């Protein structure tokens, strides 16, 4: 079964927003063993939209359309759909009343142009939108199912899960001869994309198996995809491939599917009954923000100190002034003192610390831009390591925070702390 995703909007083509809808929709289709064959994006231009819709209907069994269902003059998806396939527009009275009721719930009067959102091509099935004013629709044309959904991600996601997937599943029920597709996502940190391919050169080479590689800085993702005649066969094959990858890479694989590093670290801390504190300089609160983004982080995270200045390092973490004078803020003695100070002051079992030169200025021959120290303390051991990340300021902070979290993960697993293979370790 061939699937296509078409996203509509000038803002996508101008690069004003990241088109995350394509990734979400493709992932959801894969859950039904449907692989997306085509992705396309077009402007809010009727000619371009009609051309894209004709192409999609000619080459795909399912087309998911996102965007252009709003009330403004540049929301033209429904009109383009009707013209492309020679259908008259009809007002759906139930949808019109729902839109009016939506505004009434907020004590607002509906603007006249919102009424256009209740018009659909003749023969289309309306898809309710309980959290917005733009209903979607399903139109079947020459055997192709065309689903139109809002471009707002939270509205699209709910409509996809509640309205679109059940309808596709119903069409697939009883279909014979379709291969079963299963896929997984393995997240790695500390190894580059080309090194991953080399490490796994002999894995996932049999028929019906493919292995994809994707960089999502600072991580690299592995996407094994398998096909089988039955669900059991495909799932067994996928489990075997994932086990082989994990055995080969060891702790370089830190999570799977949607797991983030901070979620994995949080789970390990909770599982082992340990608490964590952080001391940050160059990361400027990024570590604490990521840790507390996980629901329930209060179970294990006691707090952090963002000590950007030398004075703050002394006052809040107890870093000796003499060490700062002799070695400077970006140094091994200082990052160790920061980690120990955070652990002691917050009464935590573990602490990590960061200090570095994120740039673009502030470097020297002895301490270049990109230099960073990461520190660790658990009461029995203190450790620090020097890195040089030749990156822009934003990615420098991201990489440093990920290293710090990875150190906590490795400590909890009893694994060695290793240098990142794809970024330079300093002298």
Image: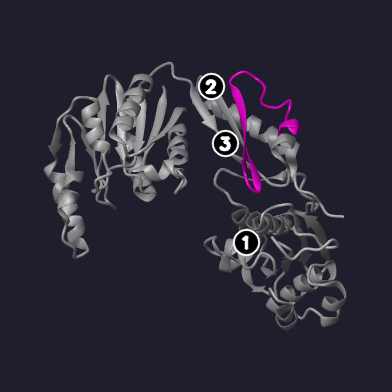
Residue placed furthest toward the top: 177
Q: Please check the rendered image and state whether residue 214 is part of the magenta-colored stretch, yes or no.
A: yes
Disc 2 crowd rating (10 Å Cα; few below 14, some 14-19, many 20+) is many
Task: State the SS at label 1.
Answer: helix
Extent of the magenta region:
197-221
Query: From the viewer's perspective, is 351 left or right of 224?
Result: right
Which quadrant: the C terminus? bottom right
C-alpha span from label 1 to label 3? 25 Å
Q: Are marks 1 and 3 in contact (CB under 8 Å)?
A: no
Residue 73 in percent (x, y) is at 24, 46
Task: State the SS at label 2.
Answer: strand
Residue 18 makes an appearance in the image: yes
Per the image, the residue denoted by label 2 is: 228
Per the image, the residue denoted by label 3 is: 184
Residue 173 makes an appearance in the image: no
Disc 3 crowd rating (10 Å Cα; few below 14, some 14-19, many 20+) is some
Number of numbered labels in the structure image:
3
Q: Nearer the viewer, residue 297 or 26?
A: 26
Residue drawn at 42 percent across, 32 percent down: 40
Mark nearest the camera among 1 and 3 is 3
Who comes first in sequence, dot 1 or dot 3? 3
Who comes first in sequence, dot 1 or dot 2? 2
Residue 158 in percent (x, y) is at 35, 46
Instruction: Name the quadrant containing residue 116.
Output: top left
Q: Please check the rendered image and state whether residue 345 is part of the magenta-colored stretch, yes or no.
A: no
Mark nearest the camera among 2 and 3 is 3
């Amino acid at each position: 079964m061939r699937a296509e995703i078409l996203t509509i909007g000038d803002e996508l083509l101008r690069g004003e927003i990241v088109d995350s809808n394509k990734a979400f929709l493709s992932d959801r289709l894969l859950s039904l063993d449907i692989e997306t064959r085509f992705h396309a994006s077009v402007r809010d231009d009727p000619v371009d939209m009609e051309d894209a819709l004709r192409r999609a209907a000619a080459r795909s069994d399912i087309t998911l359309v996102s965007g252009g269902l709003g009330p403004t003059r540049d929301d033209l998806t429904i009109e383009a759909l009707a013209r492309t396939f020679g259908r008259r527009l009809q007002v759906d009275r139930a949808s019109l009343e729902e839109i009016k009721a939506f505004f009434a719930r907020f004590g607002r009067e509906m603007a006249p142009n919102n009424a256009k959102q209740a018009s659909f091509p003749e023969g289309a099935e309306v898809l309710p939108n309980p959290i917005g004013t733009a209903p979607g629709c399903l139109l079947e044309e020459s055997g192709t199912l065309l689903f139109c959904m809002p471009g707002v991600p939270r509205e699209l996601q709910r409509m996809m899960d509640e309205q679109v997937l059940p309808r596709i599943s119903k069409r697939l029920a009883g279909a014979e001869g379709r291969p079963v597709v299963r896929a997984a996502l393995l997240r790695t940190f500390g190894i580059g994309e080309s090194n991953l391919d080399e490490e796994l050169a002999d894995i996932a080479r049999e028929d019906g198996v493919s292995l994809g590689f994707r960089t999502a800085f600072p991580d690299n993702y592995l996407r094994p995809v398998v096909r089988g005649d039955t669900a059991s066969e495909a799932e067994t094959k996928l489990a075997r491939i994932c086990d082989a990858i994990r055995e080969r890479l060891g702790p370089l694989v830190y999570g799977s599917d949607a797991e983030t590093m901070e979620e994995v670290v949080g789970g390990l801390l909770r599982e082992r009954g340990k608490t964590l504190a952080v001391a940050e300089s160059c990361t400027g609160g990024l570590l604490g923000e990521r840790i507390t983004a996980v629901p329930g982080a209060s179970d294990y995270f006691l707090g952090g100190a963002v000590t950007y200045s030398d004075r703050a390092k002394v006052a809040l973490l107890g870093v000796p002034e003499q060490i700062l004078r002799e070695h400077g803020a970006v140094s091994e003695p200082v990052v160790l003192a920061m980690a120990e100070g955070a652990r002691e002051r917050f009464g935590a079992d573990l602490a990590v610390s960061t200090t570095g030169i994120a740039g673009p200025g502030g470097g020297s021959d002895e301490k270049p831009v990109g230099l960073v120290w990461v520190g660790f303390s658990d009461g029995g051991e203190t450790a620090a390591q020097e890195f040089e990340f030749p990156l822009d300021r934003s990615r420098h902070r991201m990489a440093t925070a990920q290293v710090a979290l990875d150190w906590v993960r490795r400590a909890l697993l009893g694994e060695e702390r290793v240098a990142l293979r794809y970024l330079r370790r300093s002298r």
